[in-house]
């Protein structure tokens, strides 16, 4: 496509966009099990309208856009209250969970540089199930990732975590809940380790930060995971997920201001003026910040409790239905609307492709092989339909167990590569080829 010589009409613009969107997953009607968090048109319209009001504003300079400073401060204060923070709790809004994670790791690296200069090769200890953004942060910021193994229930083995602590350790990480199986790491035990060894502890609640507090309030079995635990020093939670703000906006909170100063980047010798940035990005879209504030204020605690009830009811229906299929099983004990199922008898990647042929967009995972689901209010009306088609798809695969599909080939090739650095190159090649050439190449389950 060449750069256009002259503009086209508004009608042509929207006609072309509508044509392109026909390729997308049908998230509005619950056919997509990740990426989009839809709680109905009333909330969506409000968030879009508020975003539009702040469309041209830029959070890069809070001295110019003081409204954004006010909105960001109030949003962070509301989130801190939800996570049992106090008047010392501070933070920043970022563009999403990955940036919140990047900034947290950068913060602890810079704190260690300032206060523990004897550490020249800083390390962080995180479960193997931790979000891949921590791997990205380790790669970007020169912090060695040390993986802790999981127990049979897919939660991190805290005894193994303690054995992995060295004089170079600067950070422990736990997930609440983690992405692959939707289970809660034992944050209280990690908090005790952090206090015992005088380490920092980051809790990644990007996925469930705006669901598990309300599940707990409804009587669900959610252990303490937030600033109520003395060892927790920071928390990340995405507002564009179960808080239903516009993409992309996430909250990164610290127990006190002493920590947050290490997140900032400043440069005083630039001819363009004094420069300071709180996050990886310079420009921060004001619409996203305003949408987060609006979603929290509009929905409120009672609204989030009601949404959570709806999500839990749909999740229970799905879990019960999947457990009733003899060939399938749920991994671990997921307490929220995030879970995965596997099979000892069927190739779940082939099963996913059969379901996709029926209109469902399914996230696929490996290590172990399983299919991943995130339940939102949009899935309330489709749970029964999905279960019926899941049972039908299982029977189809049982009738042709040697079915080889695109996903079977893709995941099979990846698993067959013994050198994981070559596996990484394989992934990059597949993804790059899809982005360049299009076609039917896919790589589900990125989780970003």
Image (tube, helix red, strand yellow):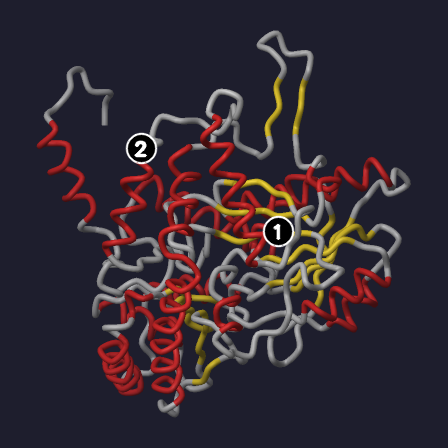
The quarter of the picture where residue 38 lies is bottom left
Looking at the image, which residue is at 58% across and 47% down?
252
Horizontal relation, residue 444 to residue 423: left or right = left
User: Is 401 above or below relative to 235?
Assistant: below
Q: Which residue is mark 2?
A: 53
- Mark 1 neighbour class, 10 Å CA radius: few under 14, some 14 to 19, many 20 or more: many
Residue 135 lies, in percent from the top left, at 62, 51
Residue 340 lies, in percent from the top left, at 45, 74
Q: Depth-wise, is mark 2 or mark 1 nearer the camera?
A: 2
Residue 339 lies, in percent from the top left, at 46, 73
Q: Which residue is mark 1?
A: 134
Looking at the image, which residue is at 8% across and 32% down?
11
- Mark 2 neighbour class, 10 Å CA radius: few under 14, some 14 to 19, many 20 or more: few
User: Is 275 above or below relative to 31?
Assistant: above
User: Is 314 above or below relative to 83?
Assistant: below
Per the image, label 1 sits on a secondary structure element best described as helix
Per the image, label 2 sits on a secondary structure element best described as helix
């Amino acid at each position: 496509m060449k750069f256009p010589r002259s503009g086209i009409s508004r009608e042509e613009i929207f006609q072309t966009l509508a044509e392109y969107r026909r390729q997308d997953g049908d998230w509005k009607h619950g056919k997509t099990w990740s990426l989009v968090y839809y709680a109905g048109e009333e909330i969506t319209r409000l968030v879009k309208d508020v975003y539009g009001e702040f469309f041209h504003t830029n959070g890069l300079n809070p001295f110019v856009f003081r409204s954004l400073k006010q909105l960001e401060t109030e949003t962070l204060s509301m989130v801190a209250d939800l996570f049992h923070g106090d008047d010392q709790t501070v933070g920043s809004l970022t563009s999403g969970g990955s940036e919140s994670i990047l900034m947290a790791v950068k913060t602890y690296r810079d704190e260690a540089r300032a206060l523990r200069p004897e550490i020249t090769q800083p390390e962080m200890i995180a479960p193997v199930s931790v979000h891949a953004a921590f791997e990205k942060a380790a790669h970007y910021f020169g912090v060695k990732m040390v993986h802790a193994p999981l127990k049979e229930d897919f939660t991190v083995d805290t005894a193994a975590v303690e054995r992995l602590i060295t004089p170079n350790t600067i950070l422990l990480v736990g997930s609440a809940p983690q992405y692959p199986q939707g289970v809660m790491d034992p944050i209280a035990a990690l908090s005790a380790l952090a206090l015992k060894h005088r380490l920092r502890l980051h809790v990644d609640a990007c996925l469930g930060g705006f669901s598990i507090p309300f599940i707990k309030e409804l009587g669900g079995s959610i252990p303490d995971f937030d600033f109520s635990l003395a060892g927790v020093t920071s928390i990340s939670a995405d507002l564009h997920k179960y808080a239903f703000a516009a993409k992309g906006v996430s909250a990164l909170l610290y127990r006190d201001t002493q920590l947050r100063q290490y997140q900032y980047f400043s440069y005083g010798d630039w001819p363009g003026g004094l420069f300071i940035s709180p996050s990886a990005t310079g420009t921060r879209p004001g619409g996203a910040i305003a949408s987060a504030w609006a979603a929290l204020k509009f929905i409120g605690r009672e609204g989030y409790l009601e949404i959570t009830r709806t999500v839990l009811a749909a999740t229970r229906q799905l879990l019960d239905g999947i457990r009733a299929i003899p060939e399938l099983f749920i991994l671990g004990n997921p307490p929220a609307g995030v879970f995965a199922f596997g099979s000892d008898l069927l190739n779940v990647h082939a099963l996913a492709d059969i379901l996709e042929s029926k209109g469902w967009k399914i996230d696929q995972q490996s290590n172990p092989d399983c299919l991943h689901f995130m339940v939102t209010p949009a899935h309330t009306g489709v749970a029964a339909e999905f279960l019926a088609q899941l049972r039908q798809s299982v029977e189809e695969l049982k009738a042709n167990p040697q079915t080889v599909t695109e996903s079977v080939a893709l995941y099979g090739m990846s698993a067959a590569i013994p050198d994981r650095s070559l596996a990484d190159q394989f992934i990059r090649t597949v993804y790059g080829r899809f982005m360049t050439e299009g076609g039917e190449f896919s790589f589900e389950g990125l989780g970003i």
